[in-house]
């Protein structure tokens, strides 16, 4: 049947007086052009049918997955399958009598079919990737890494298939050769394999998600994770620059993930006032009476001074020297004032750790550290809250006869020089 069909044009050309050789080549050319035209017409018809169908399905469907398929032109590439299958049937008819050329043409069609299949698979998985990113459950997962791994395997198989088609060697022999050269393959794809291992560990251990704020000092990254792929992690820094980090670095190096802070009830404030040691002293009765006018510590001073006086009187303590017995100090009262101030501050989270502690003395002075959490975790608001607290405390220090440590002017001058 194929031979009779291919000789229709040939016989007609012979009847017109054209020589056998010319008729043979013209027959091949006409049949090949006819096959290509039929394939093109079929491609147009199938595409129009699929386009109308896909649009109707997308409008009626409750999910938006089909919208992503259309956006990535999956129906358009599916439409190429039918004309390609038609060419598989028509090309052997056109090349009857040209076995070598027919073999080359069929190999080209087979390679085209492999490439078309890989293209469709790639676009389908891109659609799946973007669709899953619209779901809260998958939005912060490194889907790009898994899809890239799958596509690497798909392309390896596709390339091996193409080599098998060109060389006419069975594909399993290529896999045998790959096994023998596995060391070279591991060396070539070392970064990809390390990235795959890292992506799996990052996902299983929930170390990093898309949208997490991370600080990676080694790479100068301080911002939000915007993309996790097989080889790299992209971080958009707060100055809007992009830092690219090797995925494997997430499990081989140390970095800070701020997700715990973002999911908690507050953001930590940990800063100290360095108080000059020379300004620390015992409080006199006159000092206590003066400080009782400060509302936040009035009840505290009333209670503490009453208990201290009772203790000293009961034990007949000689108070001609202030060091004898129990006493109030200006740094202790100030520490209590700071504690009360924070507990009454509306922007401080009272449900989390809140303390004012005195650290070990240093050559600069006595560090009085605030350890608390702001209720608002947004960076700009957090900085405002912290500045507001320390503005007040610095202004309150003179009321307790305290001074903040500062380098003497002569020393600062020497440093500048």
Image (tube, rainbow, N blue to C red):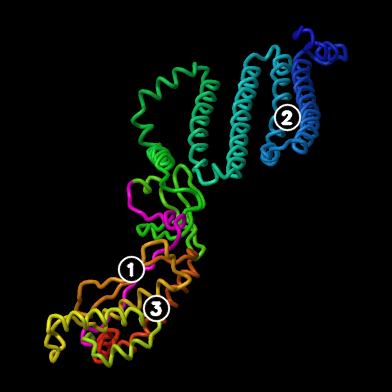
**Screen quadrant of the C terminus:** bottom left
Q: CA distance from mark 3 to mark 2?
A: 68 Å
Q: On the image, numbered disc 2 is attached to which residue?
A: 79
Q: Which mark is residue 337?
A: none
Q: Are marks 3 and 2 in contact (CB under 8 Å)?
A: no
As helix, strand or loop, the secondary structure at mark 1 comes to strand
First of labels 3, 1 by sequence position? 1
Q: Residues within 10 Å of mark 1 (few under 14, many from 20)?
A: some
Determine the residue located farthest toward the front in the rendered image.
314
Q: Residue at x 72, y 34 (%)?
A: 76
Q: Which mark is residue 355?
A: 1
Q: Is residue 58 magenta?
A: no
- Residue 241 screen position, x and y as percent: 49, 62
Above or below: residue 268 compared with residue 392: above
As helix, strand or loop, the secondary structure at mark 2 comes to loop
First of labels 1, 2 by sequence position? 2
Q: Residue at x 42, y 59 (%)?
A: 221
Quadrant in the picture for residue 165: top right
As helix, strand or loop, the secondary structure at mark 3 comes to helix
């Amino acid at each position: 049947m194929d031979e009779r069909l291919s000789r229709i044009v040939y016989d007609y050309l012979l009847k017109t007086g054209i020589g056998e050789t010319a008729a043979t080549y013209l027959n091949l050319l006409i049949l090949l052009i006819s096959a290509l035209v039929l394939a093109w017409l079929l491609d147009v018809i199938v595409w129009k049918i699929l386009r109308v169908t896909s649009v109707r399905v997308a409008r009626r469907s409750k999910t938006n997955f089909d919208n992503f398929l259309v956006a990535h032109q999956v129906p358009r590439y599916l439409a190429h399958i039918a004309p390609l299958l038609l060419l598989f049937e028509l090309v052997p008819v056109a090349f009857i009598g040209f076995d070598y050329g027919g073999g080359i043409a069929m190999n080209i069609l087979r390679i085209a079919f492999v490439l078309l299949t890989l293209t469709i698979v790639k676009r389908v998985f891109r659609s799946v990737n973007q669709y899953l990113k619209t779901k809260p459950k998958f939005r912060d997962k490194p889907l790009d890494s898994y899809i890239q791994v799958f596509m690497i395997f798909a392309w390896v198989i596709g390339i091996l298939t193409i080599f098998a088609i060109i060389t006419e060697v069975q594909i399993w022999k290529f896999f045998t050769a790959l096994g023998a050269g596995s060391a070279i393959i591991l060396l070539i794809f070392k970064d990809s394999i390390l990235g795959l291992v890292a992506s799996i560990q990052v996902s299983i251990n929930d170390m990093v998600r898309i949208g997490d704020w991370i600080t990676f000092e080694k790479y100068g990254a301080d911002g939000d994770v915007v993309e996790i792929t097989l080889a790299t992690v992209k971080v958009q820094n707060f100055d809007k620059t992009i830092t690219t980090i090797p995925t494997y670095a997430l499990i081989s190096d140390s970095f800070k993930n701020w997700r715990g802070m973002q999911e908690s009830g507050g953001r930590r404030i940990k800063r100290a006032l360095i108080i000059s040691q020379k300004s620390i002293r015992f409080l006199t009765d006159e000092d206590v009476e003066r400080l009782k006018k400060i509302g936040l510590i009035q009840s505290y001073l009333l209670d503490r001074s009453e208990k201290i006086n009772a203790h000293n009187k009961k034990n007949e303590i000689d108070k001609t020297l202030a060091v004898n017995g129990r006493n109030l100090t200006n740094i202790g009262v100030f520490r209590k004032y700071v504690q009360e101030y924070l507990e009454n501050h509306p922007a401080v989270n009272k449900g989390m750790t809140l303390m004012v502690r005195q650290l070990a003395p240093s050559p600069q002075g006595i560090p009085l550290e605030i350890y608390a959490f702001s209720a608002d975790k947004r960076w700009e608001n957090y900085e405002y809250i912290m500045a507001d607290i320390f503005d007040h405390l610095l202004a309150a220090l003179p009321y307790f006869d305290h001074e903040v440590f500062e380098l003497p002017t002569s020393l600062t001058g020497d440093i500048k020089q």
